[in-house]
Image (spheres, rainbow, N blue to C red):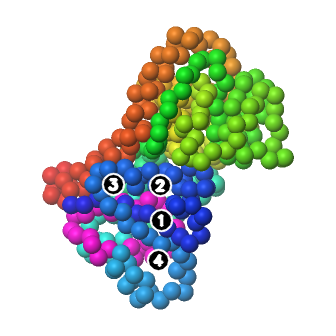
Amino acid sequence: MTIYMTKRNGNFQETFFSGWDQGASGKSQADNLTYIQEMNGRIIDFFVYSDKGEDISHRSARFDGIFSGLKRQDIVIIQYPLLFSLETQRLIIQKIHQIGAYVVAYVQDISPLWQTKGDYHTPSDEPLFTEGDGIIAHTNQMADQIRRQWHLPPEYPIVIRGLAGYVTTLFDSKDRHVTDPIDYAGGLHKAPFLVELARHQPMNIYANVDDAFEVAEGMEIQGSYDPEAISHILQGSFGLVWDSTDYPEVEGNYGEYERFNSPNKLSMYLAANEPVIVWDQAAEAEFVTRNRIGLVIKNLSELPDRLAKLTETEYQEILKATANIGILVRSGYFLKRAVLEMQGRLVLADLKIL
């Protein structure tokens, strides 16, 4: 039995990995492949293209070649979304099943249905959810929502990954203190709240800032960094994991999505051994609280007071706990655990043991 994971390729890419320059998506997918190979898994390359008007026999022959090395009970983990037409997705699933191998959807993001549209009711046509053999989801909340929205039966295997992995090549942990500014790294289009927050709390901003963005007092603009480098650069006391269209509450579709996903940004901070600040309704809030790796707040207006009351001794204890979780994040422990659990569930169910 061999575990495979798909890699997305395309002639539109300017970097070595498709989507690398599009936020955290490209690095996350590349890191997943690194971890799968560390498990002695293999990569299946897909060249993403528009298949509109393509003869189905040509398409079928192409995937016969791609999957020619598969054998019965192999597991093909497809990084979702796949970015092929629904017809091609069904063809891929059919080809893999004809060999007797399994198809598992590994959820990167559920977009645009959840992230952009905020639609948690419509069971859109998602063959990888409804016609595959299992799903690896970020959190229990995501798994429950997928099961409800796509009407999946209780026995359909959905395994929880937890935190995303984050590969760091030359790890350099910083000397952090509770009085340091907090860090925010990410797209400013999802962070209009930063202007008001910075008036109350000093911040390092890791992003490209254009003329349309108001640089408020309290902001230190650090610039934008490649996702491979950012974990070596972050220098604040805490990393802020927050999406909202307003201050101080969480508003908007991106904010609502935090109830279900485990953001790559969260793993980015933890890979740098940097404690985090998360919304108390976020899916990972309980994990942060239980492992004492940061602060969980109801809204941003609470933050200055919470930080002011935190002693350096308390903060150093948080740092120690964060360093332990950082090791697991950098090693891809949570992904590897989920893959092995899925492997066990599929094979044992096939043998009628479960």
Between discs 2 and 1, the one toward the N terminus: 1
Q: Which residues are magenta?
A: 67-92
Quarter of the image where one finds residue 242: top right
Q: Is residue 329 above or below residue 342?
A: above
Residue type at numbered disc 3? Gln
Between discs 4 and 1, the one toward the N terminus: 1
Q: Nearer the viewer, residue 121 or 187?
A: 187
Residue type at numbered disc 1? Arg
Q: Is residue 41 left or right of residue 352?
A: right
Q: Which residue is mark 1?
A: 8
Residue type at numbered disc 2? Gln
Between discs 4 and 3, the one toward the N terminus: 3
Disc 2 to disc 4, how far (Cα)? 23 Å
Disc 3 to disc 2, how far (Cα)? 13 Å
Mark 2 element type:
helix
Residue type at numbered disc 4? Glu
Residue at 41 percent across and 68 percent down: it is 45
- Is residue 153 visible in the rendered structure shown here? no
**Residue 295 located within the stretch drawn in magenta:** no
- Is residue 278 visible in the rendered structure shown here? yes
